[in-house]
Image (tube, coloured by chain):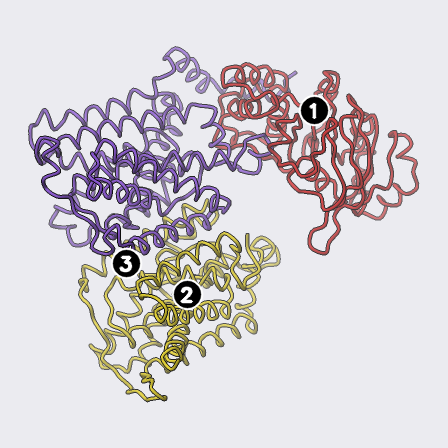
Chain colours: A purple, B red, C yellow
C-alpha cells in the first residue's frame, strides 16, 4: 500500500515513535501532574514560610494563573484573541459586590452569581461578535469592555464613578479581616486548581479537539462537521465564568470596587502576555507565564536600574518573545523535545 | 438516488458562477466532474457541501432538501470532502487530524472509537508510519492523502474529492486511483473534480462537464470524450489542451 | 437651539482633528491588515514633539509640525522593520502584540522622561464670536490643516507612483508583488506615513488641549471607532468618520449627561462592527 519514499522516511521517525511508546506507558493524566504540582506548591508556600507578605504576592501570581488559564481556553485552544477579557472579571466582580454590599448576600452565594453574570454576558456576546474573525473580534472585545466600563460609570445602583465599598463589619462573618484575607487566598487556590483541571479536560476532550480544529482552520473544521458557532460560544462562556467568580473574590478582599480598576484594559493585555510567554494552547503555558510574568514584574519594580522603565523593559521582552519564540516557553520545549510532549501538555 | 441537483445556480454579485446545474447521482457510482479552469467545479462542490448557499435551485441529499444547510450539517448527514488546496490542521498530528474527521463526521464517535478508526484509515491510505508527526510537516502528496483519510474517517455516504491527483507524481497518481476505486467498492458514492484526464476517464462511471458555470455534457466517459461541445470547450482553453497533450505523450 | 448649533460646530471642528488622528491607523490597517496598537503612544509623541520644539526652542507650533512629521515618518519605518516586518504574515495576534509591545516601550520610556504630569502648548491665536458662540482660532486652524493634509494624502495616493503602489499593495499584496511592486519597502513606507499622520495629529491636538504622555490612548480608542465608521485605508472615509464622531460628541451632551458619550460611542462601535465590519463607507477587506 505505502509508496516507496514513505517506508524510507519511516525509518527516520524513531524519535516520534519512541515518544508514542513512552506516552502509552505513562498513563493518561500524566500531563496534569506538573500543573497540579505547581499550584499545590504555591498554595502551601505561604504556610511554610508563615509570612503574610508571601501570601499576598502569591495571591497575585495565583490570580494571574487563573485568569490566564481561563483566557487560554479561548485564545490558545480556539484561536480567538480577546483583548477585553477583563470585562468578565469586572462585571462578575460588580454583580457579586453589589449583592454583598447592598443586598447583604454572603461571599459564598455572591461568587457563583458573579460567575453566572460573566457566563451570561459571554453567551450573549458569543452569539453577536464571535462571527467576527481575527482583528475584528479583538477590536469588538475592546469596544465591549470600554462600553461596559462607561456604562457602569453611569449606573447609579452600582455607585457610578465612585463605585461601592464593603462595610468593614462584613468581614466579621468570616472571622475578622485577617481570617477573611487568608480565606480568600485558599478559595483562590481552589479555584485556580479547578480552572487548571478544566483546562486539561477541555484540552484532552472531543470538545477541545473541535476547538483546536477551529483554531487551525475554521472553514475546514466546519466542513469536517465541527459545529463552530456553538463550540466557539461555549469556549467563550467557559473562559468567562471563572474570571467572573474570581472578580467577586478579588473585590471582596479589596473591600471596594470602582470602574477603572475593574475594567482596566491593560489587565486584559497582561493576561494575553502571560499566555504567550508560557505558551498558548497548552495547559502548563499560562501557569508558567503567570509565575514568570509576575516574578519579572516584581523584579523590575524593585530593581533600582529598571524601576523607572519597567514598562519599557517588559515591552522589549514581549517583543522578543512575539518575534522569536511565538510558541512560548512550553511550546518551544514541546517543539524542541517531542519526547516531552506528554508531560508538557 | 443519493444526490439530486435541481436547477442549481450561484451568483456572486453580478457574476453567474453556476447556472442551472441539474443531475441525479445514483448510489455507489463515481461521477467525474471536469471542465476548464474557472468553469465552476469547486463552486459546485461548495454549493453541494453547504459552504455556499445556492442562489437558485435545490440540492437533495438522500431524499432530504439540504439547499440551505451549513457545512457541519452536511458532514453530520454523511457528506465529506477534500479541498483543492489542502487544508490540514497544521499544528495537530496526522492522527489527531483523522480522529477529528471521525469525531465530527456522520457517526460522531468519541475519542477512543475515533482513534481506532483513524488507525485503520491511516493504514489504508499508507500514512500509518506518520501518525504522530505534525500535519504541517507532511509533503503535498502526503497532505492529499491526509485530507482523504480525514474525509474517509467520517464514514461518509458521499465523498467529494477536489483534485486529489493534482501535483502528484505518476506513481502517486496510480496509488491514489487505487484508493479511490477501493473506496467506491466499499459502497461510498464519489464525485471527483479532476484535471488528469486519463485517470478520471478510467475511474469514473459517468462524467459531467462544466463550462462557464453551465453543464454542457453528461454521460459515460466514452460519450463525453467524443462530444463536439466538450472538445470545443477544451480547445478554447489552450492551457488545458496543452496539458491534455502532455498527458497523452506521458502515457 | 443656538446652543445646539454651537455644539455641532464645536463637534465638527474637533471632528476634523479626530479624523486626522484616525487616518494613520486606518491607513496601516487597510494597507497591511495590521491594527497598530502603538498608535496612541505615537500620537502622544507628536504632542511632546511640538511641545519640546515650542517650549524649548521657541519654534512656532505649526512650523514644528513639519519636524514632527519627518520624525514620525522615520520612526514608523524603524518600527516597521524592527517589530512588524517579521510577523507581517503571521496570525493577527502576533502583529497585535508586536505593536502593543512597541506601545509599552514608548509609554515606558516616555513616562520615565516626561513623567505623567500634564503639559500644554501655550500658543493662542485668540478667538472670534459667531452669534453667541466663541470659537478659538486654534481650532479653526487645526481643522483647516487636517482638511489640507487629508486632501494631500488623497492626491498622493492617487497621483504619485509610490501612492499607487500603496493602493496596489492594499488591494492585493501578492498580485502587486507579481507585478514588480517592492512590497516590503511599500509596507514600510505605509507604516511610516501612518505614524507620520499620527504624530502630526498629536501635534495639532497639543495646540488645543493640555495633555500627558498617556493622552494618546483616548485618541487611539476614538480612532478604532472612526476606523469602523469610515472604513479602512481611505483618508476621506476617516475624515467623515471623524466628523460623525465629533458631531455625536457635540450633540449627545445636549440630551443627556456628557458621561454617557463613551457608552453610546462604544455601543455604536460594536454594533457597526457586527453589521458592517468593513466600515460604514468602506467596501473592502474581509
- The residue drawn where x is 31% and y is 60% is C217
Secondary structure at numbered mark 3: helix
State the separation of the CA atoms marked 2 and 3. 19 Å
- The foreground one among A141 and B68 is B68
Rendered position, A262 above or below A199: below
Secondary structure at numbered mark 1: helix
On residue B176, which mark appears? 1
Residue behind mark 3: C106
- The residue drawn where x is 61% and y is 19% is B126
State the separation of the CA atoms marked 1 and 2. 54 Å
**Position in image of residue C203 (x %, y %):** 32, 73
Rendered position, B174 above or below C43: above
Badge 1: chain ID: B
**Position in image of residue A113 (x %, y %):** 30, 36
Disc 1 or disc 2, which is closer to the eye? 2
Secondary structure at numbered mark 2: helix
* Figure label count: 3
Residue behind mark 2: C22
Q: Decide if residue B7 is on the left or right side of residue B53.
A: right
Characterize the local packing of mark 1: few (<14), some (14-19) or many (20 or more) Cα atoms within 10 angstroms. many
- The residue drawn where x is 37% and y is 45% is A323
Q: Answer with the quarter of the image where residue B217 lies.
A: top right
Rendered position, B217 above or below B201: below
Mark nearer the N terminus (2 vs 3): 2
Quarter of the C terminus of chain A within the rendering:
top left
Amino acid at each position: 500500500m505505502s509508496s516507496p519514499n514513505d517506508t524510507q522516511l519511516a525509518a527516520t521517525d524513531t524519535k516520534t515513535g519512541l515518544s508514542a511508546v513512552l506516552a502509552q506507558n505513562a498513563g493518561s493524566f500524566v500531563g496534569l501532574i506538573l500543573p497540579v504540582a505547581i499550584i499545590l506548591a504555591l498554595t502551601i508556600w505561604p504556610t511554610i514560610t508563615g509570612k503574610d507578605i508571601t501570601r499576598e504576592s502569591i495571591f497575585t501570581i495565583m490570580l494571574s494563573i487563573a485568569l490566564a488559564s481561563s483566557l487560554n481556553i479561548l485564545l490558545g485552544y480556539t484561536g480567538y484573541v480577546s483583548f477585553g477579557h477583563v470585562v468578565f472579571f469586572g462585571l462578575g466582580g460588580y454583580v457579586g459586590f453589589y449583592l454583598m454590599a447592598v443586598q447583604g448576600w454572603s461571599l459564598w452565594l455572591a461568587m457563583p452569581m458573579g460567575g453566572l453574570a460573566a457566563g451570561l454576558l459571554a453567551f450573549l456576546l458569543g452569539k453577536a461578535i464571535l462571527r467576527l474573525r481575527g482583528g475584528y473580534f479583538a477590536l469588538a472585545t475592546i469596544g465591549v469592555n470600554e462600553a461596559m466600563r462607561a456604562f457602569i460609570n453611569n449606573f447609579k445602583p452600582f455607585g457610578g464613578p465612585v463605585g461601592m465599598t464593603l462595610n468593614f463589619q462584613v468581614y466579621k462573618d468570616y472571622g475578622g479581616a485577617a481570617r477573611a484575607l487568608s480565606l480568600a487566598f485558599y478559595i483562590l487556590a481552589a479555584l485556580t486548581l479547578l480552572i487548571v483541571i478544566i483546562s486539561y479536560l477541555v484540552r484532552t476532550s472531543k470538545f477541545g479537539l473541535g476547538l483546536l480544529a477551529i483554531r487551525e482552520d475554521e472553514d475546514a473544521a466546519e466542513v469536517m462537521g465541527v459545529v463552530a458557532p456553538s463550540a466557539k460560544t461555549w469556549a467563550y462562556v467557559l473562559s468567562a465564568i471563572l474570571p467572573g467568580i474570581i472578580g467577586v473574590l478579588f473585590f471582596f478582599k479589596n473591600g471596594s470596587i470602582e470602574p477603572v480598576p475593574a475594567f482596566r484594559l491593560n489587565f486584559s493585555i497582561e493576561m494575553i502576555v502571560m499566555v504567550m510567554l508560557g505558551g498558548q494552547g497548552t495547559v502548563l503555558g499560562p501557569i508558567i507565564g503567570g509565575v514568570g510574568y509576575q516574578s519579572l514584574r516584581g523584579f523590575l519594580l524593585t530593581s533600582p536600574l529598571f524601576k523607572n522603565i519597567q514598562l519599557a523593559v517588559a515591552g522589549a521582552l514581549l517583543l522578543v518573545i512575539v518575534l522569536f519564540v511565538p510558541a512560548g516557553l512550553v511550546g518551544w520545549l514541546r517543539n524542541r523535545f517531542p519526547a516531552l510532549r506528554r508531560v508538557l501538555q | 438516488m443519493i444526490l439530486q441537483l435541481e436547477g442549481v445556480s450561484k451568483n456572486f454579485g453580478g457574476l453567474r458562477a453556476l447556472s442551472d446545474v441539474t443531475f441525479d447521482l445514483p448510489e455507489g457510482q463515481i461521477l467525474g466532474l471536469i471542465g476548464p479552469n474557472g468553469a465552476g467545479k469547486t463552486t459546485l462542490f461548495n454549493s453541494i457541501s453547504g459552504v455556499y448557499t445556492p442562489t437558485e435551485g435545490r440540492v437533495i441529499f438522500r431524499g432530504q432538501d439540504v439547499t440551505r444547510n451549513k457545512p457541519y450539517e452536511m458532514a453530520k448527514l454523511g457528506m465529506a470532502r477534500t479541498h483543492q488546496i489542502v487544508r490540514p490542521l497544521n499544528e495537530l498530528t496526522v492522527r489527531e487530524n483523522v480522529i477529528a474527521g471521525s469525531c465530527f463526521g456522520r457517526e460522531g464517535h468519541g475519542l477512543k472509537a475515533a482513534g481506532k478508526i483513524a488507525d485503520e484509515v491511516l493504514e489504508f491510505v499508507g500514512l500509518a508510519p506518520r501518525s504522530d508527526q505534525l500535519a504541517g510537516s507532511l509533503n503535498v502528496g502526503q497532505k492529499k492523502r491526509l485530507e482523504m483519510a480525514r474525509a474517509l474517517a467520517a464514514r461518509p455516504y458521499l465523498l467529494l474529492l477536489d483534485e486529489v491527483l493534482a501535483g502528484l507524481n505518476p506513481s502517486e497518481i496510480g496509488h491514489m486511483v487505487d484508493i479511490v476505486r477501493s473506496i467506491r467498492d466499499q459502497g461510498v458514492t464519489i464525485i471527483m473534480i479532476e484535471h488528469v484526464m486519463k485517470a478520471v476517464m478510467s475511474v469514473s462511471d459517468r462524467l459531467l462537464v462544466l463550462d462557464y458555470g453551465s453543464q454542457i455534457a453528461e454521460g459515460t466517459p466514452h460519450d463525453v470524450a467524443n462530444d463536439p461541445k466538450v472538445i470545443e470547450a477544451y480547445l478554447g482553453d489552450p492551457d488545458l489542451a496543452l496539458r491534455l497533450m502532455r498527458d497523452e505523450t506521458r502515457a | 437651539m443656538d446652543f445646539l448649533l454651537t455644539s455641532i460646530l464645536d463637534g465638527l471642528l474637533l471632528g476634523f482633528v479626530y479624523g486626522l488622528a484616525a487616518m494613520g491607523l486606518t491607513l496601516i490597517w487597510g494597507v497591511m491588515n495590521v491594527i497598530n496598537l502603538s498608535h496612541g503612544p505615537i500620537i502622544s509623541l507628536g504632542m511632546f514633539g511640538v511641545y519640546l520644539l515650542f517650549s524649548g526652542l521657541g519654534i512656532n507650533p505649526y512650523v514644528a509640525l513639519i519636524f514632527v512629521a519627518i520624525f514620525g515618518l522615520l520612526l514608523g519605518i524603524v518600527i516597521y522593520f524592527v517589530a512588524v516586518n517579521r510577523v507581517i504574515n503571521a496570525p493577527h495576534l502576533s502583529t497585535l502584540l508586536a505593536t502593543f509591545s512597541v506601545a509599552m516601550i514608548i509609554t515606558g520610556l516616555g513616562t520615565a522622561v516626561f513623567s505623567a504630569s500634564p503639559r500644554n502648548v501655550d500658543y493662542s491665536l485668540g478667538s472670534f464670536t459667531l452669534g453667541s458662540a466663541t470659537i478659538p482660532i486654534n481650532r479653526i486652524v487645526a481643522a483647516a490643516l487636517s482638511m489640507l493634509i487629508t486632501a494631500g494624502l488623497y492626491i498622493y495616493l492617487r497621483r504619485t507612483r509610490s501612492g499607487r503602489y500603496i493602493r496596489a499593495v492594499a488591494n492585493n499584496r501578492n498580485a502587486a508583488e507579481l507585478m514588480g511592486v517592492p512590497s516590503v519597502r511599500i509596507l514600510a513606507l505605509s507604516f511610516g506615513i501612518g505614524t507620520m499622520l499620527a504624530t502630526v495629529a498629536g501635534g495639532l491636538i497639543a495646540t488645543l488641549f493640555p495633555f500627558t504622555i498617556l493622552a494618546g490612548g483616548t485618541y487611539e480608542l476614538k480612532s478604532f471607532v472612526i476606523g469602523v465608521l469610515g472604513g479602512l485605508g481611505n483618508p476621506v472615509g476617516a475624515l467623515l468618520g471623524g466628523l460623525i464622531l465629533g458631531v455625536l460628541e457635540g450633540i449627545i451632551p445636549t440630551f443627556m449627561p456628557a458621561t454617557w458619550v463613551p457608552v453610546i460611542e462604544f455601543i455604536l462601535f460594536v454594533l457597526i462592527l457586527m453589521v458592517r465590519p468593513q466600515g460604514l463607507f468602506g467596501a473592502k477587506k474581509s
